[in-house]
Image (cartoon, grey):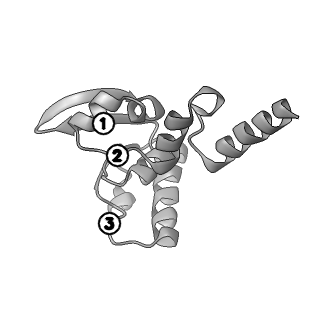
Amino acid sequence: SLLVVEPEILILDEPTTGLDYKECKQIMDAVRELNRQKQVTVVMVCHDMEVVLDYADRVLVMAGGTLLADGETREIFRNEVVMRRASLIPPQITGLAVRLGGRFYYADTVEEMVDALEFEIRKAE
């Protein structure tokens, strides 16, 4: 019902809490569509870093009422100091990519990780 008034800004507080994967994806795909098609600015409070990685282009990290970081999602997740200060754990795929380093460092999706692995296998042959 809120969308009937066509807001310019939509503020969501933990919109995926309690949802299973399929429901979460449906909600977040609809939010992404609003953002892209209707040019609605979406501000979302979320503690699910997997959802943040999949749907947010820009992240503001706060802890104790203080802004710790503002930037591109993938770069924020690689900032160990900010993540530690905010008591956040990056998505598993990002953590693995950082630990592997090298060609894998920027692999934040399964597809990107597979591409990096295939590259390394071809290189080793």
Q: Nearer the viewer, mark 1 or mark 3?
A: 1
- The residue depicted at 29 percent of the width and 58 percent of the height is 14
- The residue depicted at 34 percent of the width and 56 percent of the height is 5
Task: Tell me the kind of residue under disc 3.
Answer: Thr
The residue pinned by badge 1 equals 83
Label 1 neighbour load within 10 Å: few <14, some 14-19, many 20+: some
The residue pinned by badge 2 equals 89
Disc 3 to disc 2: CB gap under 8 Å: no
Query: What x and y, as percent, mark residue 23?
Result: 47, 71
Is 74 on the left or on the right of 86, as rendered?
Answer: right
The residue pinned by badge 3 equals 17
Q: Tell me the CA gap for discs 1 and 2.
A: 7 Å
Badge 1 or badge 2: first in the primary sequence? 1
- Which quadrant holds the C terminus? top right
Label 2 neighbour load within 10 Å: few <14, some 14-19, many 20+: some
Badge 3 or badge 2: first in the primary sequence? 3
Q: Quadrant of residue 88?
A: top left
Vertically, is 100 above or below 14? Answer: above
Q: Quadrant of residue 66?
A: top left
Badge 1 or badge 3: first in the primary sequence? 3
